[in-house]
Amino acid sequence: MPLIKAAFMGVLEGLTEFLPISSTGHLLIAQQWLGPKSDLFNIVIQSGAILAITLVFRERLLSLAAGWRQAEQRDYLLKLALAFVVTAGVGLPVRLMGWKLPETVVPVALALILGGVAMLAIERALAHRPGQTHIGWNVAVWVGLAQVVAGVFPGTSRSAAAIFAAMLAGALARPAAAEFAFLVGIPTMFAASAFAVLEYASNTQAPPENWAALAVAFGTAALTGFAVVRWLMAWIKGHSFAPFAWYRIAFGIAVLLAAWAGLVA
């Protein structure tokens, strides 16, 4: 049963990490019935999903690595680095000081609803602007800050915050914004996982971790995430994010009603 539950959690993580609907919110609800998981488990399975990005964008990553001497490729790499540095430089002190809302049902549900409303507003504001593909330095800074906001406010969705920050800061086309947000997620989430492992290793009071379950969840998250990212990148070439925004709002309201009825806590 622990391995079956872990596989389900991995699939759920892979489905919700990249769609702008908040993996935290869905995992929180799932853990109401499947049992709570450690911070190490929740963060490391996110890296399983992030591994999917390296596979989906492997040609883009190889192109960037091989062409770093070219001005355009080097410029893109530096902007990815800047976004990561902003995330780490602001996010690490915030984490160490414990500035984070609790991962409880009501705050997460409110973040889902407010995030959905914000997504609809941004989509409407940018509807008649021609989407650009050039990533500006301001986009890198705002994407980095957006990832910090997503970490402080569970339910925001890291992918949603980063994608919409990129769209708003640079009036970017959805595919360009999503690609940049996803690529920034590679060092961000791998670094977060490494930090979580170090925290676990240095905590002598930490409960034992089920490493087999963690490995199963990691693998299923990677496989599911690979399929989801490929589908999403094709979808947003001709569609807006509005369906995901409405889903967030509906899901957030459903969670609030479930909390009010005492079904979740």
Image (tube, rainbow, N blue to C red):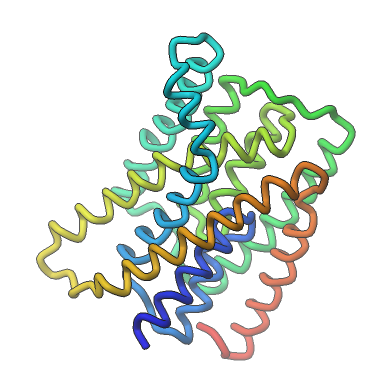
Residue 80, image x and y in percent?
48, 28
Q: Quadrant of residue 88?
A: top left
Q: How many numbered markers are drawn?
A: 0
Against 68, residue 264 (above or below) is below
Q: Residue furthest right?
A: 128
* Frontmost residue, 84 versus 257: 84
Instruction: Tell me if 121 is positioned left or right of 91 in this view.
Output: right
Instruction: Tell me if 120 is positioned left or right of 78 in this view.
Output: right
Q: Visible in this render: residue 254?
A: yes
* Frontmost residue, 139 versus 177: 177
Instruction: Tell me if 199 is positioned left or right of 109 in this view.
Output: left
Q: Quadrant of residue 90?
A: top left
Against 55, residue 250 (above or below) is below
Against 86, residue 51 (above or below) is below
Q: Visible in this render: residue 148?
A: no
Residue 127, image x and y in percent?
86, 38
Residue at 57% over, 90% down: 262
* Image quarter of the N terminus: bottom left
* Frontmost residue, 182 versus 156: 182
Residue at 65% over, 35% down: 177
Residue 153, image x and y in percent?
51, 55
Residue at 48% over, 45% down: 55
* Frontmost residue, 70 versus 30: 70
Residue 247, image x and y in percent?
73, 65
Q: Residue furthest left?
A: 204
Residue at 32% over, 67% down: 215
Q: Quadrant of residue 156?
A: bottom right
